Amino acid sequence: MRKTIQYITILLVTCAFTFNVTHAQNNQAKYQLPPYEKFQLPNGLTVYLMEKHTVPVISISAIISAGAVYDGNKAGLASLTAECLKCGTKSYTKNEIEQTFDFAGASFNTYGAKEFAGLTARLAVKDEDKLLPIIKEMLVEPVFNNEDFTKEKKRTLVNLDQAKESPGSVINLYWDKFFYGNHVYGNVVTGTVSSVTPFTSNDLKDFYKTHYAPEGSAIAVVGDFNTQEMKTRISQLFNDWKKTTTSTNNLAAQPVAEPTAAKILLVNKEDARETTFLIGSKGVSRNNPDYLAIQVVNTVFGGRFTSWINDELRIKSGLTYGAGSYFSALKTNGAFLISTHTANETTEPTIAKALEVLNRLHTQGIDEETLTSAKNYMIGLFPPRFQTTDQLAGLLTGMFWYGFDESYINNFETNVNAVTVAKAKEISDKYFPKDKLQFVLIGKSADIKKIAEKYGAVTEVQIKDDVGKGF
């Protein structure tokens, strides 16, 4: 009797789960990007406004063409400049900014990335009159107070030293410098101890004056407001942001040299018990017309927990706690990367197994059942990525920067389902590398150098040195 009750219970739960999944999928199929208004101020600033009245909050995302690609020979300057937007403004000290946001239960952040700088904020509707002017001044009228700058620089230098104790924190910096070389995408975003140490607040002021401008920038506001009222508010706040007088070239538009042979960068960390590695090659830019189909194929290969590469390296062989792959897609270029880490003694079989799975993609391809599973997985995860005001604000500035529109959202399910087995094969052959692979390994050289040499010419550097030194 007990077994019968258990069976009935399991059956009911299964039916309920099936209903919920089906119901969710039916709802997901109807997902469309909420309506929004886009306009441009006379100074060139692009503005996105989207009403979302589910909760009384407002989220803001701003994006400025002031990333590390403009660092020149001062690696880390864009990153530190963006961080120090918080170091006081014309009307507010750093402490006043932080205390005002904290007291209101609001949040904000500034950051510098490879291609752009940005600001994000989230606040209650009742606090917009108090906080929006502060946000505006951080973007338009920062003062880079010398005392606050000095403290921030010290924190940066400490973080740069500490990061080297965690290979996973720095391996992408090594990859970018190794793979992109002298192209501006190879600039070390965080900077190095040697490059950051000489910075003064005047360096930041000069960088800001040259690269922070309304033209080529965008701000998205999403939340519980009236569009016409917010349009007036944003226009009043940002109309006086003056254009720069300096013309800035799109340095990232320069072509990236493609690999001509397999190469290995070995970063020696004497006390390492594990090898952390990236294997990859040329990828795609974000506006590639096959971008979505590439994501479908990568979902099978390394984009989810049940992917081929995680299944082989973690679940079946126990060589690692996790493995995956991804396309680092930038505005004009990008890279394909396989990522994992393993114990020193299992470095060789782990690399071999990763390459075996990559070869399997090309020799066996993806069958219909596996492809359908990957497409359902992507469709199931898609709408939840764009539900909150924060997510939607980030999406809008992402659309601005990378040049895609709402059709990417509105036609997502249709376009994912359009990927056939034949298309998946075409994508695999075209975009997933077969040879001339590039490797970055961080580990104990004495244990892994001979292994690395099996795959190509090895360049060895020391992790205690600055990223970029010696290669």
Image (tube, helix red, strand yellow):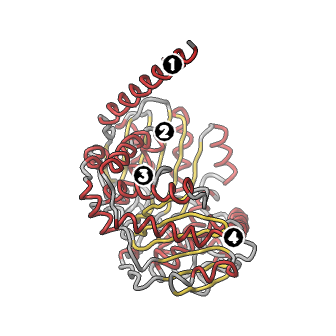
Quarter of the image with the C terminus is: bottom right
Quick one: label 1, few (<14), some, or many (20+) residues within 10 Å?
few
Give the mark nearest the N terminus, 4 or 1: 1
User: Percent position (x, y) of residue 66?
Assistant: 47, 67
Q: Is residue 106 left or right of residue 139?
A: right
Residue type pointed to by label 2: Ile
Residue tagged by mark 1?
9
Residue 164's disc is 4
Q: Quadrant of residue 342?
A: bottom right
Question: Is label 1 in contact with label 3 (beta carbons under 8 Å)?
Answer: no
**How many neighbours does mark 3 have within 10 angstroms: few (below 14), some (14-19), or many (20 or more)?**
many
In the picture of the structure, the residue carrying the numbered disc 3 is 219
| Picture layout, residue 59 above or below residue 334 | above
Element type at mark 2 = strand
In the image, 416 versus 242, the foreground residue is 416
Could you tell me which residue is drawn at 55 percent across and 53 percent down?
Answer: 315
Residue wearing tag 2: 58
